[in-house]
Image: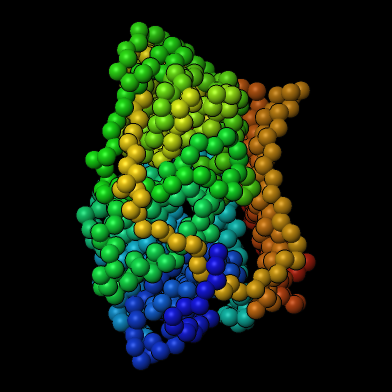
Amino acid sequence: MRTVSTPHEVREDEHVWIPMRDGVRLAGRIWRPTWSDDQPVPAVLEYIPYRKRDLTAHRDSIIHPYVAGHGYACARVDLRGSGDSEGVLTDEYLEIELQDGCEALEWLAAQPWCDGTAGMIGKSWGGFNGLQIAARQPPQLRAVVAVASSDDRYADDVHYMGGCLLGDNLSWASTMFAMSCTPPDPALVGDRWRAMWHERLEHAGPWVDTWLEHQRRDDYWSHGSVRDDYSQVRCPVLGVSGWADGYSNAVFRLLEGLDGPSKGLIGPWSHTYPHVGQPGPAVGFLQEVVRWWDRWLKGIDNGIDDEPALRVWMQESMPPDTSYESRPGRWVGEPSWPSPNIRTDHSQLGAGHLAHPGEEVAERGLTIESPLSVGLFGGKWCSYNAPPDLPFDQREEDGGSLVFDSAPLAERLEVLGLPVVHLELRSNQPVAMVAVRLSDVAPNGEATRVSYGLLNLTHREGHGEPQALDTTERFHVAVPLNGVAQAFPAGHRIRISVSTSYWPLAWPPPRPSQLTVFTAASTLEMPVRAPRPDEDAQLAPLGEPEGAEPIPVSTIRPGEHRWNVTRDLAEHVSALEVLRDEGTLRIDNIDLAVSQRAWERYTSTANVFASAMGETEWTMSFCRGDWAVEVVTRTRITCTEDTFVVHARLDAFEGDDRVHSANWRRRVPRDHV
């Protein structure tokens, strides 16, 4: 990334209090042009729980001064109960969070350096609440940039996919368990820091059991899911994601569902901002953000309206790997979504092969009962690109799956959109799931997963009212796969793989199940895009990544990343162990040392589905001189055929003294999961 000077000099207000109506104060950090006291400018709010003082300080120093230097007042605000803000954080997207967000916008608009208008930007959590607050239509909010986020909290988030409980539900809950129990910085809040910290330790607690209590789509998940009523979002929205991220599907839905001006951008990236995007290429995202604010907060006619509604990175074929430095490809654009330039090709599933479009195959009943080890090479639901967490060569997974291969392609094929696999099935268990994978198979047999989808078959009629399967009847399901833009070279094969488990990416059903796939009514729908080189060549370049000069950070202890799959053939235990240790970094300008270490382990024994277990441990510490604090959280989920069992523990230390300890043990009935 290139560090550049901005057109305007920027001043920084390191710590400001933003009062809420109930007396709680939110902590904010503000960058704005030095002349904005005399010439007010629009405000841009990023509103997240990830600690502005330290954990996001380096990242924030690249983004917000850059945008402020182009004529905006950028505010980075900690949610209630996080970072240096007052209060306690007990869950995501609560009503009080959204109310606070509206009040923060009102406060920003009332400042003498603000012209009364505002935008919201955020990655992940900040993209979610940007959309959710937009649906409340606060008068100050004129536009949103939502990066790596979703409009559907149940069906397209870290908790559930296709009605299947995701392994990331545990790892994300563990992240926020630790984060919500960390203290504010005494350098900003003074002697009150200890009382604020102990209030959090007493009341924050684990979140995972709450999410487990809502295993179907209900009012809990509808709250904050703008997909339920897109008409409530009336301001322009720029939706951004990456193919390695978990949230690319939302970009397609936003473009299709929103009535107001909207644009979509999807690159090859994992869960990160595109100006530091990995896998590369990273792009000049902050320049695009400034253009977006110029258009919708300042009313400058800069040509954005005339650009394609959707711009995506068409990925070239690559050998399978768990991490890529970059993905070869090119940018392509579509005037709208759904696009008139996409056709749907239908291929029937045959006995071990994928028929040519239009070819009919004879009826066959093919059975599959996958071993519980299928899924160990599936990677993370949402890739962070560190440690290496992308799916590996699928051939080992395919050994426990039904596989349908096309003939070698006679010519190059490009797809753009969401493939769908239709299956006619019969299950020998009342609760079962299906995992469907789309892979690019090279002539040497290497299989790179391109996309996948999951479906809890008791949710075949919808996520609101699961229904047990009748083991004597055949039924039809449509399994949507994640959206993708991918080129399949001539000579390669397209593979569809069907399995009855995908652990630990998704929690397995209560018991092993056998599915019969009936081929006559089972098909693959592929969204095919014919290349349009002349039109694609006219796309304006996104430019090289730019940003402001980052604050200095020193490495005190290097980090360590591990991603280990093991098989104990004596005890029949399969395990995935993940270590993400960020080491210890010192934020030099405030002389603060910060450490973060996350460890995860997922195990199962033989083919005993009720043996599935996930456990995590998070350690976060902060140190400056004589002030040293540490939070350690541990969470474990085990199960029986009818119950999830959660055991969580919290320990907090001030120096060498343990100042707080708590344990939780809760049982949650399984609800058709």
Q: Which quadrant holds residue 51?
A: bottom right
Q: Which quadrant holds residue 106?
A: bottom left
Q: Is residue 389 visible?
A: no
Q: Is residue 265 above or below residue 666?
A: below
Q: Which quadrant holds residue 307?
A: bottom left
State the residue in front, 645 or 345.
345
Q: Is residue 575 above or below residue 82?
A: above
Quarter of the picture holding the N terminus: bottom right
State the residue in front, 37 or 290.
290
Q: Residue furthest bottom?
A: 38
State the residue in front, 480 or 595.
480
Q: Is residue 304 above or below residue 41?
A: above
**Residue depicted at 65% across the width and 73% down the height:** 552
Image spot of residue 484 (x, y percent): 41, 40
Image spot of residue 315 (x, y percent): 46, 42
Q: Is residue 224 left or right of residue 372?
A: left
Count of numbered badges drawn on the protein: 0
**Residue depicted at 51% across the width and 56% down the height:** 282
Image spot of residue 424 (x, y percent): 35, 18
Q: Residue furthest front?
A: 534
Q: Is residue 211 above or below residue 86?
A: above
Q: Is residue 651 left or right of residue 253?
A: right
**Residue depicted at 68% across the width and 35% down the height:** 565
**Residue depicted at 66% across the width and 26% down the height:** 605
Q: Is residue 263 visible?
A: yes
Image spot of residue 408 (x, y percent): 46, 21
